[in-house]
Image (cartoon, grey):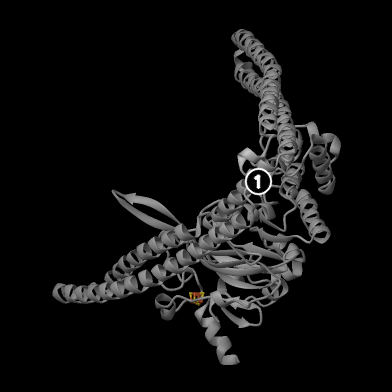
Amino acid sequence: MQNNDLKQNDDTLLEVKNLKMYFDITTGFFKTTPLKAVDNVSFKIKKGETLGVVGESGCGKTTLGRSIMNLYNPSSGEIIFNGMSISAYSDLKKIKLEKKFELRMLWFEMNKSLKQFKKDLDPNMPEEERQRKITHRQTELYAQLQSDTVRLSKEYDEKYLAKKAEIEAAINQAISNKTEALNKLTPVSKDSDNNIAMVDSKTIELKEKAKADILAAKQEMLPKIAAAKEKKLQGFKMLQEKKQADKEAISKADASNKQKLKKELVVEEIVMKEKIVADYNVEKSKAYGQYQSTRNEIKAALNADIKSLREQSPYYTYVDNVASINNQCKAEIRRVKSSSKIRMKAFRKQCTMVFQDPYSSLNPRMTVQDIIAEPLDVNHLYSTKEERRSKVLELMRKVGLSPEQSTRYAHEFSGGQRQRIGIARALAVNPQFIVCDEPVSALDVSIQAQVINTFEDLQKELGLTYLFIAHDLLVVRHISNRIAVMYLGKIVELAETNELYEAALHPYTISLLSAVPMPDPKSARENKRIILEGDVPSPMNVPTGCPFRTRCPRACERCKNEVPTLQEVKPGHFVSCLLVQEELKGNN
Ligand code: SF4
């Protein structure tokens, strides 16, 4: 079975199909080489499952997680969430980009193959024969390139035209629905309604009043900002004075103490400066926040008043109905044209990410409640400030943080508590799926256990699905239902956790598992450690054939020429190794 044919399950939440994430790296004048961070990866995750992803540093685990979240725009491939295809681009643009990418890769692969051919030629071969062989191979490769280019172009052009026709049909349908709905309305002429003058004059009056109220709210905000600015300037003045006093203290200090004192005072100055800026930002955003909510309230009240006024007039009721039908049609056309963007927005509400570093992933200038409420603000998921606050406090309780700490800043928390803040932020939108990117690798071992337990408890309580990226095999074993092992951007083995740990098949997985420390000294002594030779090759220059062949203890001539694919060798156990596949085929 090919990797893209992995078994279809009805309870699949996320499906990744042939995902590629290549970065163009400049390697000379007008020359770029693709860095294959994720290369043709396919897998599925069931609802409520945890799929662990392991591998050495640089194997593409994090890039895979970020590509799924569309924090990077994948070079090609498809991500299907809850049966919906997700992409940051519109459907037509995505097809065009994929075509361009695939055609460029054909050129790249041809050049690479020719280079390898030249390298493999016998160095003692006479020059004339060497040239003849190279020319012959070149001709073969060009012919192959041409036919592949024609085939691929045709495939993508057909796909493009089919999608275009689908979009056009949907637009035509929306227009005909609009015409039908307009025909059903009974026209009302302006002359037939005496209320028009009254509605118009009252509307103008209401608008003027709302304008004046908004202006007053703005005027109220400005002095608050000016006061915050004044406080900031005073703070900086004090900082200047402190700097001057520190300079004098340093000049008077003993030579032996000078450096130590200098360092201490510099740290004090940095902390003071950060506090001044943070205080200013908090006060400024508070004033703007108040202004924004007052303005929104005034506008909402104005719209409600105008709506009830217009409902008294048959003419305006008719005009509003026409406008609403037109708007519905426009919205439908917009939805059809940019449906993938809308899907992406919906996807972002259901999928979130917990980042690796709990220190750099939290804004030091925001309080914990603002950090956790950021996704709520972006997605407009509350109607009053009280609702926002109660949601934040509930999230803090859920991840084991005390609600009293909500007004503190991130630097006032330990590493484990910070990671809990990150988890609370990820839970804010009530997601179904979370990408956990090495969420415990920056924490102490004792704190790791607490955070892992939090993940497990939340999964049980909320039915969450995780993609759990880590390089610690023991952590992954503890939390995952299934595990995927990655090497040089590809999945080389994928199986249920117990199956993988007890009957690993790929030579790379076997060597990784042999390095796991064992708590029992007797078993540790008996365990035969497999030490891989050589370094991980560069993802810009992946070896031909099997990518693992340069370090594989079982590599043979066949591994040099054939590229293994991920195939199911036992129920639910997928391996990408030519020898293992052949052996198990022989056994069956
Ligand atoms: S295909 Fe060959 S090189 Fe690759 S893992 Fe299997 S034995 Fe090793």
Amino acid of disc 1 = Tyr
Where residue 580 sits, quadrant-wise, is bottom right
- Farthest residue in the front direction? 192
Q: Is 378 positioned to the left or the right of 400 in the image?
A: left
x, y percentage for residue 190? 61, 39
Q: Nearer the viewer, residue 330 or 134?
A: 330
Q: Quadrant of the N terminus?
A: bottom right
SS at mark 1 in the image = helix
Residue 161: which quarter of the image?
bottom left
Q: Is residue 585 visible?
A: yes
Observer able to see residue 61? no
In the foreground, 434 or 174 = 174
Note whether 12 is above or below 455 in the view shown. Answer: below
Of the pair 437 and 250, the residue shown nearer to us: 437
From the viewer's side, name the closer residue of 559 and 375.
Answer: 375
Residue at (79%, 39%) from the top-left corner? 388
Q: Quadrant of the C terminus?
A: bottom right
Mark 1 C-beta to ligand 1 under 8 Å: no
Q: Is residue 70 left or right of residue 296?
A: left
